[in-house]
């Protein structure tokens, strides 16, 4: 199979969080086209697990969906090493820390419009430090759930965030959840 060819690229929009690039391309079938790509920094998502196997979630209200839902702690890597970014995000959003981290690799966020990667980490044996900044993150609650309860919540739509569901799935394949 032939590859895509990029003839030219230009940034058509840019802000602090992302940019939109317009590429003049040649498709694998040889036809010309235009492709718009969102360039964003990588993100991290953390699956925080207690010694008893429960998973911590945060409840967050998102402007874009106008919904309050349960999600895993996550955020931008800010060009930082992904493990360090995961540790930072976990503590900032939950006040939890861990000395036992496992990398589960990456997930493609939305490959039809961005090359952005999501780095998934498990934080085992998490402990509460009370240093969380929930107000700054628009986080209203934090709670731990059993893996069985998490699956029920996904089924009911109480957990609907794609990166969260992907990370839970990836963790379940690697760990004994």
Image (cartoon, rainbow, N blue to C red):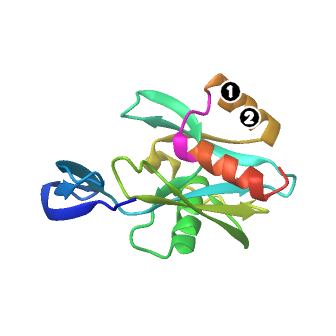
Callout 2: SS: helix
For the N terminus, give its image quadrant. Answer: bottom left
Task: Give the image location of residue 166, x and y in percent.
Answer: 60, 47
Q: State the separation of the CA atoms marked 2 and 1.
A: 6 Å
Residue at x-position 82% and y-position 49% = 177
Verify CB contact (< 8 Å) between mark 2 and mark 1: yes
Q: Is 118 or 25 nearer to us in this picture?
A: 25
Disc 1 crowd, CA 10 A, few/some/many (<14, 14-19, 20+) = few
Determine the image quadrant of residue 151: top right
* Residue marked by disc 2: 151
Tell which of 61 and 18 is nearer to you: 18
Which residue lies at the image location 43% right of the left edge and 50% below the top edge?
Answer: 136
Residue drawn at point x = 80 percent, y = 47 percent: 54
For the record, the magenta segment spans 158-163
Examine the rendering and report whether any part of residue 146 can be seen: no
Residue linked to disc 1: 155
- Which quadrant of the figure has residue 156? top right
Pointer 2: residues within 10 angstroms few (<14), some, or many (20+)?
some
Magenta region includes residue 75? no
Label 1: element kind: helix
């Amino acid at each position: 199979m032939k590859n895509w060819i990029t003839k030219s690229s230009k940034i058509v929009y840019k802000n602090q969080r992302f940019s939109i690039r317009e590429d003049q391309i040649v498709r694998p079938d040889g036809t010309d086209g235009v492709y718009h790509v969102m360039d964003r920094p990588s993100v991290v998502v953390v699956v925080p697990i207690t010694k008893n196997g429960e998973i911590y979630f945060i409840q967050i209200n998102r402007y874009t969906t106008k919904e309050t839902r349960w999600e895993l702690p996550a955020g931008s890597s800010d060009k930082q090493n992904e493990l360090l970014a995961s540790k930072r995000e976990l503590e900032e959003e939950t006040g939890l820390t861990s000395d036992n981290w496992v990398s589960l690799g990456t997930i493609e966020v939305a490959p039809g419009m961005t090359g952005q990667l999501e780095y998934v980490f498990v934080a085992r044996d998490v402990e509460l430090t009370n240093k969380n900044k929930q107000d700054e993150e628009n986080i209203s609650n934090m709670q731990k759930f059993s893996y069985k309860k998490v699956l029920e919540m996904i089924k009911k739509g109480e957990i609907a965030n794609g990166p969260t569901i992907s990370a839970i799935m990836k963790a379940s394949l690697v760990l004994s959840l």
